[in-house]
Image: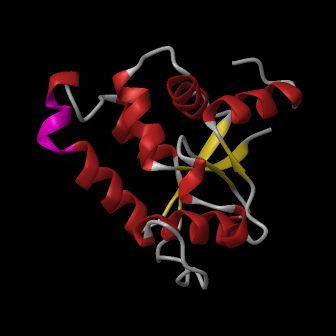
Amino acid sequence: MSILAVLDTNVIVSAGIRPGSSPARIVEAALDGIVVPVICPAVAKEYHQVITRPKFRRWDFPPLWLTGLIDLAHRLDHNPPPWPLTGPDPDDLIFLALAHASGATLVTGNSADFPKRIRKDVTIRTPTEYLDHLAGLGHHI
């Protein structure tokens, strides 16, 4: 049983910086086919823009696994409609819109960017909470 997840960019970055961390374990689960990441053109662009920043070069970014992760992802050919509510970081609203459009869980290391008042029906979990959720479904990662 695969699980749909929209991975916030901070999860991707953390996975590349800290092997063995909760974000890295989620990426491993995606590469193993347990988790199905969901992306759209705007999220793919965001990943690329962030991971190619000079400050991440010391961690050998982009991570070798990123292309494989994107290749395995469930991709929407178009961006979802704009999120109707405003939040602390307007650039993060695409992640809510994508999770809503796909029925995926949004996994983020920064829940403060997604206050409850703007989430509507989107389930948001930290990487650790998401791993606990997967374990509850019988996936021990």
Asked if residue 32 is positioned above or below residue 67 in the image, the reply reads above
* Residue at image coords 75%, 72%: 120
* Residue at image coords 59%, 72%: 97
Lateral position of residue 85 relative to residue 134, left or right: left
Decide which of 11, 35 is in the foreground and name it: 11
* Residue at image coords 57%, 53%: 112
Decide which of 97, 89 is in the foreground and name it: 89
Quadrant including the N terminus: top right
Asked if residue 5 is positioned above or below residue 63 in the image, the reply reads below
The stretch of residues the image draws in magenta is 52-57
Where does residue 47 sit, x and y in percent of width and height? 34, 51
Asked if residue 140 is positioned above or below residue 124 in the image, the reply reads above
Where does residue 85 sit, x and y in percent of width and height? 60, 81
Image color mode: secondary structure
Where does residue 93 sit, x and y in percent of width and height? 51, 70
Q: How many marks?
A: 0
Decide which of 135, 91 is in the foreground and name it: 91
Quarter assignment of residue 57? top left
Asked if residue 73 is positioned above or below residue 135 in the image, the reply reads below
Quarter assignment of residue 109? top right
